[in-house]
Image: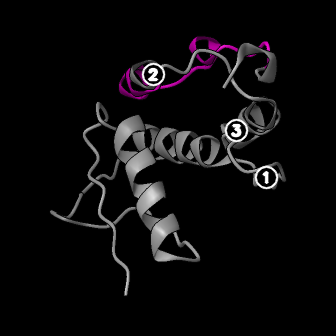
């Protein structure tokens, strides 16, 4: 995506857990897209948000970043081995795989595990 499609919001200025920040840097993201700039500050406060934008504008990354931040800042007191902390539903197998791939890239340094199931 070219710079002309990015906002002025830098991911580095967001108060995100270090592992998550590293995953964002590893993907090459520096500036948020307009939909990310509009939704992330709200979602990171724990407020529900809905947004609409064209395909390829970063909606999935915005959702995943907010989800990771929530999970990382609210650790379980007594975690169960292999316990599920979040479930993301997708309309198709292909979309489920895309979301899982994005989640693995962004969350590589978080210590959280990703699984994908479809059928």
| Residue located at (54% from left, 39% from top) | 65
Q: Which residue sits furthest left?
A: 81
Q: Which residue is mark 3?
A: 45
Q: Which residue sits furthest bottom?
A: 119
| Residue located at (38% from left, 80% from top) | 118
Q: In the picture, which quadrant includes the N terminus?
A: top right
Q: Is residue 87 visible?
A: no
* Labels 1, 3: front one: 1
Residue 21: numbered disc = 2
Left or right of residue 76: residue 4 = right
In percent of width and height, residue 64 lies at 53, 46
Q: Which residue is mark 1?
A: 49
Left or right of residue 14: residue 110 = left
Left or right of residue 116: residue 25 = right
In percent of width and height, residue 73 lies at 45, 37
Q: Quadrant of residue 117?
A: bottom left
Q: Quadrant of residue 20?
A: top left
Magenta segment includes 27: no
């Amino acid at each position: 995506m070219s710079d002309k499609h990015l906002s002025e919001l830098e991911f580095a200025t967001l108060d995100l857990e270090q592992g998550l920040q590293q995953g964002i840097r590893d993907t090459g993201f520096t500036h948020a897209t307009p939909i990310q700039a509009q939704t992330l500050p709200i979602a990171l406060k724990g407020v529900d948000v809905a947004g609409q934008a064209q395909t390829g504008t970063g909606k999935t990354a915005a959702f995943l970043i907010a989800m990771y931040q929530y999970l990382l800042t609210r650790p379980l007191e007594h975690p169960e081995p292999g316990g599920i902390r979040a479930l993301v539903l997708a309309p198709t197998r292909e979309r489920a795989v895309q979301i899982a791939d994005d989640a693995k890239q962004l969350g590589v340094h978080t210590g959280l595990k990703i699984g994908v199931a479809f059928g």
